[in-house]
Image (tube, helix red, strand yellow):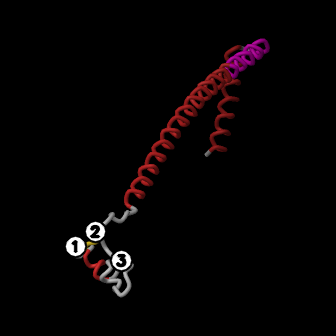
Amino acid sequence: RTDRGAPGRSTAAAGRGPARRSARRCNGRRRGPPRRRPVPLIGEITSDLGQLVRDEIDLAKAEITQEASKAGKASGMLAGAGYAGHLVLVLASLTVVFALGNVMNLAWAALIVTVVWAVTGAVLYRAGR
């Protein structure tokens, strides 16, 4: 039994002063519960941040795949439209050739249409250059 509150005793003798504090230390280290360090908290934050970045990258990959699929379909349709436009141009040119063939020799009509297309191509080339 200890008389901690006994009159006339000092706080060091009662176990609350500097003598008590020095008894709790061993080799310069303090006994008792270890101090919490913020390293696990930082580790959790970096782990969560890494997982968030990976999730965002996966989401971006999925979105890019979806957009690429749409773009592929659209470019295929545009290529089909371009080919159809080319056929329209060829057939319209043939129509003009046969229409001029009623007035003149068919070879001369074809030559006239060819020259018109050559001039059109040259003008477009110069404008684009």
Please identify the quarter of the rendering in which residue 114 is found.
Answer: top right
Mark with earlier residue (3, 1): 3
Crowd rating for badge 1 (residues with CA inside 10 Å; few <14, some 14–19, many 20+): few
Say if 108 sits above or below 128 in the image.
above
Q: Residue at x 70, y 29 (%)?
A: 116
Q: Spot the residue most to the right.
A: 103
Left or right: 30, with 78 as reference point: left
Report the mark closest to the observer, 3 or 1.
3
Residue at numbered disc 1: 26
Q: Label 1 is placed on what type of residue?
A: Cys
Q: Is residue 44 above or below residue 110?
A: below
Q: Which residue is mark 3?
A: 4
Classify mark 1: helix, strand or loop.
strand
Question: As rendered, which of 73 and 119 lies closer to the eye?
Answer: 73
Q: Which residue is mark 2?
A: 31
Quadrant location, the N terminus:
bottom left
Distance between the Cα atoms at labels 1 and 2? 7 Å
**Percent from the top left, x then y, of residue 6?**
37, 81
At a point 51% along the width and 43% down the height, the residue shown is 56
Q: Are marks 1 and 2 in contact (CB under 8 Å)?
A: yes
Label 2 environment density (alpha carbons within 10 Å; few <14, some 14–19, many ≥20): few
Is 1 on the left-hand or right-hand side of 118? left
Q: Amino acid at mark 3?
A: Arg
Q: Secondary structure under badge 2?
A: loop
Magenta-tinted stretch: 88-104
- Magenta segment's dominant SS is helix
